[in-house]
Image: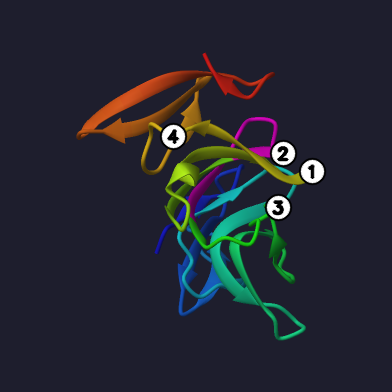
Amino acid sequence: MYPFWSPDNRQVGFFSGGKLKSVDPGGGAVQIICDAPGGAGGTWNDHGTIVFSGNSLNRSSRIVEGLLKVPASGGDPQPAIKTSGSSATTLWPSFLPDGDHFLYFISITTNSARKGVYVGSLNSMESKMLTSKVAGNTQFASRRFFYVRDRSLMAQSLDLERLQRV
């Protein structure tokens, strides 16, 4: 479920059997990257890091939930963003071109003011709300983020320097 490409398009990441896995679609064995029950989307940067939505059991037998990051070569998933103690469902991360920042969506939360599209960073646990007007998966291309509203594809310009809508 929820397949996503490596940046060189030579591997596909996906969720199956409670694991995050990868495979070369041209042939080769499936590789298990980490435990990931409830995986709901991932993104892979050109530095070999995968950010994914879901939960995992780390080596200390502690459940880690939310948006997680893990080396594409495999390892122990770590939180990618601060959850601030409230229950929230994070979905559909998508790296921006710098390979550090990523978009993601918060859908179900105990605080309805937090629903929306956010920008996170591998270099910080802090996130910034991009918009509360978009509900769902977003993807970035050609200096715009794309989303669906009322069954129509929409595009919104994004200033990559200031990480805000234009």
If you read the primary sequence from the N terminus, does the residue marked by circle 2 or circle 3 appear first?
3
From the viewer's side, name the closer residue of 46 and 76: 76
From the viewer's side, name the closer residue of 155 and 125: 125
Type of secondary structure dominating the magenta stretch: strand
The amino acid on which the numbered mark 2 sits, given as a three-letter code, is Asp
Report if residue 79 lies within the magenta region: no
For the residues labelled 2 and 4, say whether their Cβ atoms are less than 8 Å apart.
no
Which marked residue is nearer to the observer: mark 2 or mark 3? 2
Query: Taking 163 as reference, is 71 left or right?
Result: right
Q: What is the distance, in whole Å, between disc 3 and disc 1 at their CAs?
A: 12 Å
Residue holding disc 2? 100
Q: Position of residue 50 (x, y in %)?
A: 64, 54
Q: Residue 132: which numbered mark, if any? A: 4
The amino acid on which the numbered mark 4 sits, given as a three-letter code, is Ser
Q: Magenta segment, which residues?
A: 90-102
If you read the primary sequence from the N terminus, does the residue marked by circle 2 or circle 4 appear first?
2
For the residues labelled 3 and 1, say whether their Cβ atoms are less than 8 Å apart.
no
